[in-house]
Image (cartoon, coloured by chain):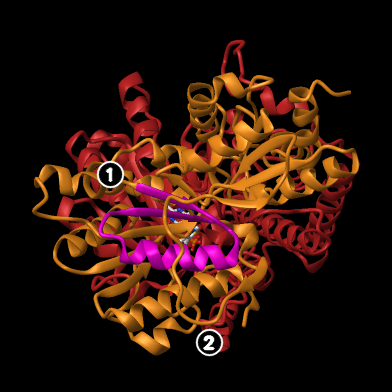
C-alpha cells in the first residue's frame, strides 16, 4: 500500500484530523491531503493553460483536448489508489497522466513533439503512456480503452495481485458497444475493473440528452447488476471517497464497480471547437464550483495553510510549468528515421 | 458556367441534390445535424431536410453503420458519414461482412444501396490512430466499390453516382482538402464510377495517383517539365473498379510508370496497379514500375515524422528519375 492510501485511511478513521489541523470546522482529511489535491489540480490547470497558449503559438499541433474543469477527478482518483493500480483513459488525458506521476516537462515536451517527450514525440497530446506509472495510455478511438482496461484488470486477477485497473471514458464513449460487451464479461468473470465515466455533459457538440433515452448515466450498470454510484466530480473529496469505496469492493474480490463522475469541461471539445452548443451560464455555474478555487478556499478558511503557504504553492507550480516549457522548447525534435523504431520488437524488413 | 467552390461544398451539393431528387436518401452520422458536421460538410442540411433525414447518432459506429445496412435492404438509400475512416474500423463488420455480401448471400433478392463516406488519410500531426488510409483495405473486398477523390467537381459527380448506385460504395475524402477549391459546373451532372481522369498529358512517364497525393504529384510533374521530362498524370478517382484501360494506354505511350499512393505499400493499391501494368504492358516497359508510398510504419506525432512518412514532390521526382535512368 502506498502512502497516499495510508494517509487517507488514517484520515477516515480519525474524525479529529481537522481539529489536529487547528481548524474549528469538520474536515475529513488531513492538511497534507488537501494540499496534495490542491497542488495536483493547480499543476494540471496551469499545465493545460500553458498548453493552450503553446497551441496558439503553433508549438503544439494536431488535436489537443484539455482537462480544465475536470481536475478534481484526477486528484480524487490518485489519492484513493496505489501506483500499482493501472489506469487507462481516452485522448483527454494530460491531467490523468500528470495525476499518475508523468512529469510535466515530459508531458509538455510531448505536446511540442520533442524527442524528450514521454513517448519521444511519437504520440502527441492524445497518447501519453508511462509504464513506470502504470499508465496504459490515452486512446484516440472513442471507447477502445474500455475492453483494453478490462483486459489489464483481467491480467491482475490472473496474476493474483490485489491491483485493479481504472478504466476511464467519456459520456460519449458510454454509448459504444465496446462498453456493453466489456461490462458483461467483467461482471461474469469478476474482473477487478473500476469503470469511471467522466460525464462532462457533452461528446463534442452532442449533449448526453441527445444520445439516448437513458440520460442518467449512473443507471448504465443496472442491467449487469454492477454496483454503481453517481459522484460530484467538482469535489476531490467526493471523488476520493467514492473511489475508495469502489476500490475496497473490487479488492475484496467482488468484481467491477462503476462510478459516473459528473464533471465539466470549461473549454471546447478541442482547440478548434468554439462550443456554441451550450449556454455561457452553464459554463459559469460550474466555474462557480471550480475545484481549484473551492479547495483553496477550504484550505484557507479552515486554517489548513496560510495565504503565504498557498502563494508558495502557486509560485512553485508556476515555476514548474515555466521550466516544463523551457525544457520542451530547448529539446531536440526526433530524427525522422526514428519513425522506424518501435513498430516491431525485433528487427524488421520494412518495405521502402 | 463553372464556379469555384470548395470540396466540402461540392460534397454537400451532391447530397442535397440527391436528397431533393429522391426522398429515400438520408444522411446519418456523428455531429452531422445540429453541429453541421465535424468538418461542416453537411452544413444547413438539417434545416432543409429535418431530423428524420439528417440524423445525429451517438458515438456507435458499428451500430449506426448496421442500421444503415438494414435500412438499405428495406428500400432506403442511406449515406453513412464517418467522422473519419479511422473510426469506420469499428463498423468493418457491417461494411465487409454485411453490406458487401447482402446481394450475394440473398442470391440477388436484397441489394444494399448505401454510401459510407468520410475523410481518409493523414491530416497533419494526428499520430498513429488518426492518420490512416483505407482505400486498399476496402478495395480488397468484392461487393464494394471504392471512390477516393478530392477534385471538387469530380467528387460531386461521383458522390451523386455513388448515392444512385444499387450497391454499397465506400467514398473517401480528405480532411485537409475540405477547403480545397476547384471549378464545378452548374446544374445536374454525374461522373461515372470506375473511370480515371488524365489530369495532364505527357510522353515520358506516367504518374498514377489519387486523393490528396494528386497535389504533390501535379507539383512533381511541373518540376519535371522544367527538367525536360514530360509526365502524364492520372487521377484514379475510383479505386474499385480500377480503370485499368486508362492506365495501360498511358503506359503503352510513356513506357514508364510511378505510382504515388498515400496507402502503406504492402498489399496496397499501388501494388495492384504495378501488377496490372506488368501483366498487360510488360513488353512496353522500359523500366520497372516503382511506387512512392507512405512509409511502411505507424505515423508518429512529431513534424519530423510526418515529413519522413508522406510522399512529396521531391520524393516523386526522385522516383521518376530512377525509372528514367536519369541523374
Ligand atoms: C470511434 C471514434 N468515433 C469518433 C471519434 C471522434 N471523436 C473524438 S472525441 C469524440 C467525443 C467523445 O466524447 P466523450 O466520450 O464524452 O469524451 P470527452 O471529449 O467529453 O472527454 C468524438 C466523437 C473517435 N475519436 N473515435
Ligand atoms: Mg464528454
Residue at the location (44% across, 68% down)? Answer: B190
Give the quadrant of residue A255.
Answer: top left
Residue sticking out furthest to the top: A347
Q: Nearer the viewer, residue A229 or A111?
A: A111
Residue range highlighted in magenta = B145-173
Determine the CA span between mark 2 and mark 1.
47 Å
Is the shortest distance between ligand 1 and the CB of mark 1 under 8 Å? no
A131 left or right, relative to A35: left
The dot on residue B143 is 1
Q: Residue B235 in magenta? A: no
Name the colour assigned to chain A in the rendering: red
Rendered location of residue A289, percent (x, y): 56, 76
A290 left or right, relative to A314: left
Which chain is indicated by disc 1? B
Give the quadrant of residue B179.
Answer: bottom right
Q: Which chain is orange?
A: B
User: As displayed, is residue A200 above or below residue A183?
Assistant: below
The dot on residue A114 is none
Camera sees residue B207: yes
Which chain is indicated by disc 2? A
For label 2, the residue is A279
Rendered location of residue A325, percent (x, y): 84, 50
Q: Nearer the viewer, residue B205 or A46?
A: B205
A216 left or right, relative to B37: left
User: As displayed, is residue B205 above or below residue B65?
Assistant: above
Amino acid at each position: 500500500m502506498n502512502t497516499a492510501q495510508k494517509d487517507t485511511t488514517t484520515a477516515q478513521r480519525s474524525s479529529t484530523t481537522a481539529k489536529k489541523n487547528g481548524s474549528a470546522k469538520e474536515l475529513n482529511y488531513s492538511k497534507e491531503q488537501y494540499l496534495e489535491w490542491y497542488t495536483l489540480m493547480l499543476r494540471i490547470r496551469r499545465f493545460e493553460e500553458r498548453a493552450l497558449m503553446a497551441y496558439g503559438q503553433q508549438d503544439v499541433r494536431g488535436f489537443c483536448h484539455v482537462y480544465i474543469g475536470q481536475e478534481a477527478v484526477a486528484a480524487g482518483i490518485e489519492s484513493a489508489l496505489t501506483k500499482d493500480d493501472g489506469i487507462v483513459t481516452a485522448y483527454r488525458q494530460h491531467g490523468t497522466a500528470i495525476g499518475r506521476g508523468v512529469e510535466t516537462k515530459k508531458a509538455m515536451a510531448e505536446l511540442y513533439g520533442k524527442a524528450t517527450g514521454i513517448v519521444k514525440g511519437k504520440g502527441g497530446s492524445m497518447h501519453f503512456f508511462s509504464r513506470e506509472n502504470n499508465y496504459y495510455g490515452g486512446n484516440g478511438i472513442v471507447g477502445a480503452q474500455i475492453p483494453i482496461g478490462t483486459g489489464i484488470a483481467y491480467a491482475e486477477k490472473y496474476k493474483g495481485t490485489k491491483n485493479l485497473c481504472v478504466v476511464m471514458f467519456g459520456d460519449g464513449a458510454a454509448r459504444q458497444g465496446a462498453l456493453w460487451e466489456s461490462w458483461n464479461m467483467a461482471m461474469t468473470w469478476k474482473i477487478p475493473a473500476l469503470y469511471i465515466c467522466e460525464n462532462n455533459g457533452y461528446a463534442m457538440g452532442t449533449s448526453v440528452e441527445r444520445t439516448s433515452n437513458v440520460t442518467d448515466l449512473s443507471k448504465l450498470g443496472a442491467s449487469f447488476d454492477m454496483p454503481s454510484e453517481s459522484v460530484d466530480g467538482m469535489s476531490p473529496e467526493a471523488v476520493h471517497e467514492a473511489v475508495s469505496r469502489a476500490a475496497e469492493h473490487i479488492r475484496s474480490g467482488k468484481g467491477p464497480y462503476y462510478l459516473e463522475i459528473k464533471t465539466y469541461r470549461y473549454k471546447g471539445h478541442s482547440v478548434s471547437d468554439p462550443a456554441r452548443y451550450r449556454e455561457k451560464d452553464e459554463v459559469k455555474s460550474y466555474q462557480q464550483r471550480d475545484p481549484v478555487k473551492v479547495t483553496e478556499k477550504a484550505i484557507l478558511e479552515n486554517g489548513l495553510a496560510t495565504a503565504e503557504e498557498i502563494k508558495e504553492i502557486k509560485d512553485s507550480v508556476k515555476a514548474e510549468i515555466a521550466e516544463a516549457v523551457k525544457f520542451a522548447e530547448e529539446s531536440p525534435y526526433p530524427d525522422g528515421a526514428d519513425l522506424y523504431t518501435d513498430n516491431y520488437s525485433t528487427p524488421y524488413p520494412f518495405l521502402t | 458556367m463553372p464556379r469555384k467552390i470548395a470540396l466540402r461544398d461540392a460534397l454537400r451539393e451532391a447530397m442535397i441534390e440527391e436528397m431533393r431528387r429522391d426522398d429515400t436518401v438520408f444522411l446519418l452520422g456523428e455531429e452531422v445535424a445540429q453541429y453541421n458536421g465535424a468538418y461542416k460538410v453537411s452544413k444547413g442540411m438539417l434545416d432543409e431536410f429535418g431530423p428524420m433525414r439528417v440524423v445525429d447518432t451517438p458515438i456507435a459506429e458499428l451500430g449506426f453503420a448496421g442500421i444503415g445496412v438494414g435500412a438499405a435492404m428495406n428500400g432506403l438509400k442511406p449515406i453513412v458519414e464517418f467522422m473519419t475512416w479511422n473510426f469506420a474500423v469499428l463498423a468493418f463488420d457491417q461494411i465487409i461482412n454485411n453490406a458487401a455480401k447482402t446481394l450475394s448471400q440473398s442470391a440477388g433478392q436484397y441489394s444494399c444501396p448505401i454510401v459510407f463516406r468520410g475523410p481518409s488519410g493523414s491530416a497533419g500531426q494526428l499520430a498513429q490512430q488518426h492518420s490512416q488510409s483505407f482505400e486498399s483495405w476496402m478495395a480488397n473486398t468484392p461487393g464494394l466499390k471504392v471512390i477516393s477523390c478530392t477534385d471538387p467537381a469530380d467528387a460531386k459527380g461521383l458522390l451523386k453516382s455513388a448515392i444512385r448506385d444499387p450497391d454499397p460504395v465506400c467514398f473517401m475524402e480528405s480532411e485537409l482538402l475540405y477547403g480545397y477549391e476547384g471549378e464545378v459546373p452548374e446544374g445536374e451532372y454525374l461522373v461515372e464510377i470506375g473511370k480515371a481522369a488524365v489530369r495532364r498529358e505527357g510522353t515520358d512517364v506516367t504518374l498514377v495517383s489519387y486523393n490528396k497525393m494528386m497535389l504533390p504529384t501535379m507539383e512533381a510533374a511541373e518540376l519535371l517539365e522544367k527538367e525536360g521530362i514530360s509526365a502524364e498524370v492520372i487521377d484514379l478517382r475510383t479505386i474499385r473498379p480500377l480503370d485499368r484501360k486508362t492506365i495501360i494506354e498511358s503506359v503503352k505511350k510513356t513506357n514508364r510508370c510511378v505510382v504515388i499512393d498515400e496507402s502503406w505499400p504492402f498489399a496496397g493499391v499501388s501494388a495492384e496497379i504495378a501488377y496490372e501494368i506488368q501483366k498487360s504492358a510488360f513488353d512496353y516497359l522500359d523500366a520497372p514500375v516503382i511506387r512512392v508510398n507512405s512509409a511502411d510504419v505507424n505515423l508518429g506525432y512529431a513534424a519530423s515524422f510526418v515529413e519522413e512518412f508522406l510522399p512529396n514532390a521531391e520524393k516523386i521526382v526522385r522516383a521518376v528519375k530512377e525509372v528514367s535512368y536519369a541523374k
